[in-house]
Amino acid sequence: MGSFYASKVFPRYPPSTSYLYSAIFTLLESIIEIGDGSCDFWMDPWLHSGPLLNHSAGLVPVNDFMTDGYWNLLKLHEYGPNDQVSNILQCEVRRERSDEVIWKASNHGNFNFKATWQLIREIQPFSGVHKAIWYKSIPKKVSFTVRRIVQSWLPVDNILQKRGITLASKCQFCGSGENIDHIFIECEMAKSVWQYLHDLFGIQYKNYSSPFHLLINWLDKSPIVGHIRMVIACIALWAIWEGRHKNKNEDRVISKATILSRIFQQIKLLGDGGIFKPVNWRGDLHRVTSFGCNLRVESPSLPRVVKWTKPPDGHFKLNTDGASKGNPGESGCGGILKDKEGSIIMAFGVYLGRETSIVAELKAIQEGLHKLCIKGIRDVMVETDSQLSIQLIRSTCCNWKLRPMVNNIKDMAEICNA
């Protein structure tokens, strides 16, 4: 269905004579990757900054500004907007194929309904709590219950009344009116459970307004995601709900001691199953014995010898590396070229500004090969520690934003016999 719709909505490139079509094309977050240059120079979105029609006027094909598959700088300056010439020159031209539409909303550049839905949907604000409750150290049955508690999706009495079901609202622990905030926060049973757990971990008890407010506080007191404190808070909410269910549907009297015993039992099961590591108890290791847990202690890894290997006779080796502080963040790349004897032939370093780590790694390879092409150095082996960069270069499909850089690397690698 998706491919059929794409073939109808997106031909090889949009008909540039239709202003309406070009407007829809731009609205749907697409871009054209230039091949033979048959798309329209002014109206089609082949620049990341949008159609050149936004800066000037005219209807001509892009290849009118190209000579033998390369940009004609004189024509660009004569007819094009001067403030866009530098952007045009940076646009990659793949002369061996036709113009191709790239769907900017997806990583691979192909149209799909998932990316379209992400464009039009209303995304709710995301909290760290929503991520923390799904951590792998928290059982999924607990995560699903906590999710329903936070979203007020549980079938408590006041919610059922709002849906037209006639029933008396009664808390199964204290007899007051039942709602989510009461069951998990306001009820004396819940308060006593939370007071015990707060005292156990040395956390100041507060007058919480909702379960979500409580989880935020416990998450703030957790040094890392997946810490035992957040796990305890989630399991406690689950245990209180389980106790309410047994009181209501199984005619069993569930006390504070029963709920706390259930919490401790779940923590011990997770500990005995090897779910917890010492890092999950950071700052609370002295409390492990209180829960009867057995922590899995990993043996230290043995040091690994890393050494530089010489290239074959008559070859050079280019070692590159890139780094990003923050990903994205302040980035840089560099490289060094050595001969068979290990003598340094060339070295370089480049500041990249704010980029991602993969861009930094690819840029290091690109810059190194570019310098080799300029110097006329051939028969080069390229070595990098980025497995992802190697996969992207060897792959026939990659993120459309990285594709021009990857294609340029492939072209230069062929020139350098790399």
Image (cartoon, rainbow, N blue to C red):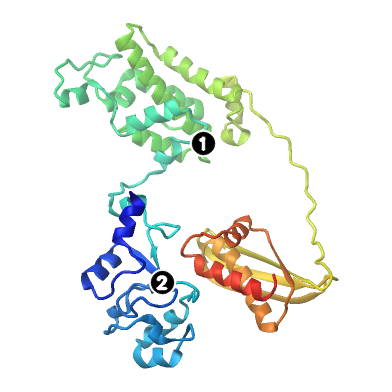
Image location (x, y in percent) of residue 3: 36, 53
Q: Residue at x 63, y 58 (%)?
A: 386
Q: Secondary structure at mark 2?
A: loop
Residue 334 is left or right of residue 188, and the answer is right
Q: Nearer the viewer, mark 1 or mark 2?
A: 2
In front: 296, or 229? Answer: 296
Q: What's under tag 2, amino acid-wise? A: Asp
Toward which corner of the image does residue 88 lie, by quadrant? bottom left
Distance from the alpha carbon under mark 1 to that under mark 2? 48 Å
Coordinates of residue 214 in the picture (x, y in percent): 37, 33
Give the percent coordinates (x, y) of residue 31.
Answer: 37, 68
Q: Is residue 2 left or right of residue 359?
A: left
- The image shows residue 176 at horizontal and vertical percentages of 23, 17
Label 2 packing within 10 angstroms: few (<14), some (14-19), many (20+): many
Q: Which label is found at residue 411?
A: none
**Residue at 45% over, 76% down:** 91
Residue for badge 2 = 99
**Residue 60 position (above or below residue 350):** below
Residue 207 visible here? no
In depth, the one of 337 and 36 nearer the eye is 36
* Amino acid type, residue under disc 1 in the picture: Gly
Q: Which residue is at the front of the view, 241 or 289?
A: 241
Where is 141 relative to 404, above or below? above
Which secondary structure lies at badge 1? Answer: loop
Q: Nearer the viewer, residue 320 or 5?
A: 5
What residue would you read off at disc 1? 226
Q: Which circle's residue, 1 or 2, is located before the other in the chain?
A: 2
